[in-house]
Amino acid sequence: MSDKKETFRIDYLLAAGFLLAMAAIAFVNVLSRYFANFSFAATEEITINLFVWMTVVGAGIAFERGGQMGMVTFYNIFPKRFKKVVIVIGGLLSAALFLVVNIYMIQAIYDELTLFHAKSGALGIPVWIYYIGVPVLSLYVFRGIFRQTRVRLRELDC
Amino acid sequence: MEILLISGVFLVLMFLGMPIGTSLGVAAVVTIWQFNLGIEMLGVNFSAGIASFPLLAIPFFVLAGVILERAGLAATIARFFELLVGRMVGGLAVVSVLTCMFWGALSGSGPATTAAVGLILLTPMIKHGYDKSFAGATIANASDLSIIIPPSIAFIIYGNITSVSVSALFLAGIIPGLITGAGTVLVAWLISRKRGYHGTERRGTPREILAALRKSIWALLSPVVILGGIYTGVFTPTEAAVVAVFYSLFVAVFIYHSITWRDFIHILVDAAVTSSVIMFIVVFAGIFTWAASVIGVVDRAAAFIVSISPNAVVMIILVDLLLLALGMILDAISISYLIMPILIPVLTAFHLDPLWYGVVFISALAIGQATPPVGVNLFTAANLINGDIDAVAKEAIPFVLMDVVVLIIISIWPILSLYLPVKAGLYVP
């Protein structure tokens, strides 16, 4: 299906790895629940937090591929110059949205490190460890939005 | 003022063509800011909106579907049905509907089913003299079934919003899904007979049918694996989904030998991205709905709907019309988040069953996905045949009319939806 020498990008490997880990942990949980007498149920916490990380990385790739769902019925009939304005504003707003989410996420991490020191319910892992994936992995979202905006603007000029 | 702000920002951005998730998120953030609803919780709420065990079923079902698709299972299923019923009038059209129904039991998304089945059956249909727009419309419409026939991402979302058991919703979708499937077969057959679309030249011999059955048996068994566990109450939908992942992987690697490690990484990436696209909408739709309900928009909208008519039937018909209209322009997930929170108090006011209503709600949305002018399935189909969306849309009209008749039937007889979940002991109305 693909060239042997092909190497995968880091964000692809991260998205794939998170999903595989989620499925593997969940599967071991099912097996242990029904076929063995002990339970790894506490690891469910890891699965759902990997889900958050996977969503952030995957959202970045989806932005880059232009795969986010949107309504293009009216967009398609806009004049070219207006399309350009919409593309730029759309990119800026998407980036701003993730920026606001991350500002408050970093604030929450800071509060955890300095004030609350909260531990997760099931495994006793400091919650900031789960949180920190969001701002770090969001770098891929910003990159994806930037690349997609650039590609769409170029396509309009052709 | 509140209504104008939150819905105005969302609608303007959406109609401009911004991603739905961005439109919802920006409208929510502006509202939270304006009304001081606690913007500092945004980061944690973003995380919490995704980190949910029931929603985990979404990436797992998506992954199982992508594995089976890349393993080439749709082709073996189609081949089996072709040998079985290909010779009757409109044979390939009937085969495509049956394959879509079956694929719907493996996948939870309409456009994905249109693409998977369309790639396999459109070319043979056109070669056998079917009008290509008719072929596209048949598959686009039959793909609707994938969001009514379990497993269905739309039902997982509905359960997440309304707290109705997803297991019960899955079972509730089976009979209405089969009725819709039968209706679709009927329409395809009637049109084929009128236009003289013949079947394939010869019927498969019993030996050939048996060989095709043996080849496709693992694919044909997957719905049993997925739904059997849920029906008997052994698995939650998320557990069933992860079992489906490893079942598909086992079938793809050990039975069909059709995927390599490298393919597997591509499969994982594509499934992760598809799930992220859904979750991007889910997470910001959740925050949007929360903001809308805190500032009282949801309650007022619900009170308005209740005040229109004291009659439940009138209410259902009006909401169905609204859903059909929305389904033509928006995806099922966004609509569920926008409309369902408003409808929950309305259902209570009219003493309507939320499980049965889930099936009606999702069916109405499914119809919109294949309804002219802009249903997403029609777009996918038009792309596949390199054809004109208007021509496909015109051919879709008889199917849509049939869908509406089925929608009325399942609206009138809740027993069709409630029988299986009650029988399985998963639901008490």
Image (spheres, helix red, strand yellow):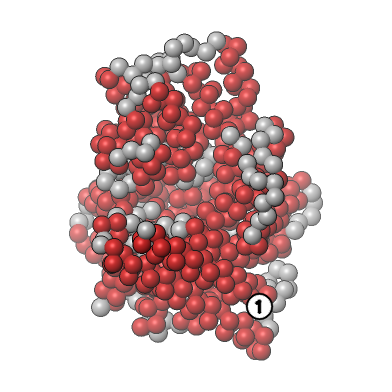
Q: Which residue is mark 1?
A: A128
What residue is drawn where x is 47% and y is 11%?
B202
The answer to whether residue A22 is left or right of residue A36 is: left
Q: What is the secondary structure assignment of the residue under circle 1?
A: helix
Q: Is residue A55 above or below residue B199?
A: below
Label 1 amino acid? Answer: Trp
Asked whether B263 or B204 is in front, the reply is B263
Q: Quadrant of the N terminus of chain A?
A: top right
Give x and y (percent) for residue B15. Answer: 29, 62
Query: Residue drawn at (71%, 63%), measured in percent from left and top?
Result: A42
Task: Determine the residue located farthest toward the left in the rendered image.
Answer: B308
Q: Residue furthest right?
A: A37
Vertical placement of residue A64 versus B427, above or below = below
**Residue nearest the viewer, comparing B24 with B374:** B374
Q: Chain of mark 1?
A: A
Q: Residue at x 79, y 49 (%)?
A: A36
Q: Quadrant of residue B295?
A: bottom left
The mark tally for this picture is 1
Is residue B238 visible in the rendered image? The answer is: no
Tell me residue B378's x, y (percent): 35, 42
When the figure is inspected, residue A59 is found, relative to residue B328, above or below; the finding is below
Q: Residues within 10 Å of mark 1 (few under 14, many from 20)?
A: many
